[in-house]
Image (spheres, rainbow, N blue to C red):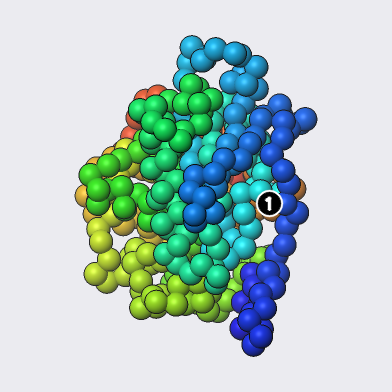
Amino acid sequence: MEILPFIRRYQSGRIDRLSPAKLVPPSVDPRTGVSSRDVVINPEARLSARLYLPPTAVISKSPPNKKLPVIVYYHGGGFCTFSASSSPYHSYLNSLVAEGELAAVSVDYRLAPEHPLPAAYDDSWESLLWVAEHAYGGRGIDRRLADCGDFSKIFLAGDSAGANIVHNMGMRLGENGMEVEGLAERIPARNKGTQPPPPSLSALKGEDFDALWPFVCPGSPGLDDPRVNPMAAGAPSLAALGSRRVLVTVAERDLFREKGREYYQMMRACGWGREATFYETKGKDHVFHIFRRPDQAAAELMRRLVGFFKEESVQGRYSMLMGSMGICQSV
């Protein structure tokens, strides 16, 4: 079994992950001053997370006067590669936390095929509940996070497979009568759309994704599984999303561009009566903001994301924005 650009499995059972990234320890980042450290959430499942705090929250020895929004971040990688300590994600979280002056919890969920889905979903849910417990000062929490975090403003964010996790956590929140402040689904990884995007520079192809889902979720009914395709017939309504706001972002040359747009449009049509924004970056490919050298487009996407986390007032029920055109349409 070979699924490019993610993974290769041999008949012997050996696994080669084809997109290796250097693992980096937590540290005080010399570029941003952001401090990170690893915490164990569930030792039996070997579930951990990496916490990020901006310099202002670390230097002060007393709780800050103004609490920080808390971002629960789920990394991408097709459910089978990368981790919270992979250098591209560690670098990106340092930048995000510094730019937005936020607190972030990057979840190191278990990977397939050693731990097939729903393991990643279960770990992601357990991590979210662990973060929420900080509002009540229970046992097993991180004291510094509890002191500086505003747990009335919890956001879930992720890219690619992580965006899929964000959606599924949003649905699980709604099913349990719970909600968070916002979901930021950046370039969601779902069953490919009906309209092809412009020519892509990415190694990711539609047939590779079609093979990836049954590989990481062998008990799934297929690509019409609502967990990977929320627009499938019989899928639960998006009206059940447990969030006050949603941001969906795509890139023009991304394989999943049309599915992201369809997801946003279905939110508008299903009766989910909160605030939603769709943002498209022109001329860019899948998760360009994580794995390619930072540029103006990546900086603008970062600015939009930080603005979403720190927004105090509702701008309109639904908005569509285009990265290279500067257009915002509220309806």
Q: Position of residue 169 (x, y in %)?
A: 38, 51
Q: Position of residue 223 (x, y in %)?
A: 41, 75
Q: Position of residue 272 (x, y in %)?
A: 25, 47
Q: Position of residue 111 (x, y in %)?
A: 55, 63
What residue is rendered at 53% in x and 25% in y? Answer: 144
User: Is residue 277 at all visible to an observer of this figure?
Assistant: no
Q: Reply above or below: 180 against 149.
A: below
Q: Is residue 167 left or right of residue 37?
A: left
Residue pushed farthest bottom?
A: 11
The quarter of the picture where residue 276 lies is top left
Q: Which residue is mark 1?
A: 86
Nearest to the observer: residue 201 or residue 212? 212
The quarter of the picture where residue 49 lies is top right
Q: Is residue 246 left or right of residue 93?
A: left
CA neighbours of label 1 inside 10 A, class few (<14), some (14 to 19), many (20+):
some
Amino acid type, residue under disc 1 in the picture: Ser
Q: Is residue 223 left or right of residue 31?
A: left
What residue is rendered at 28% in x and 54% in y? Answer: 238
Q: Secondary structure at mark 1?
A: loop
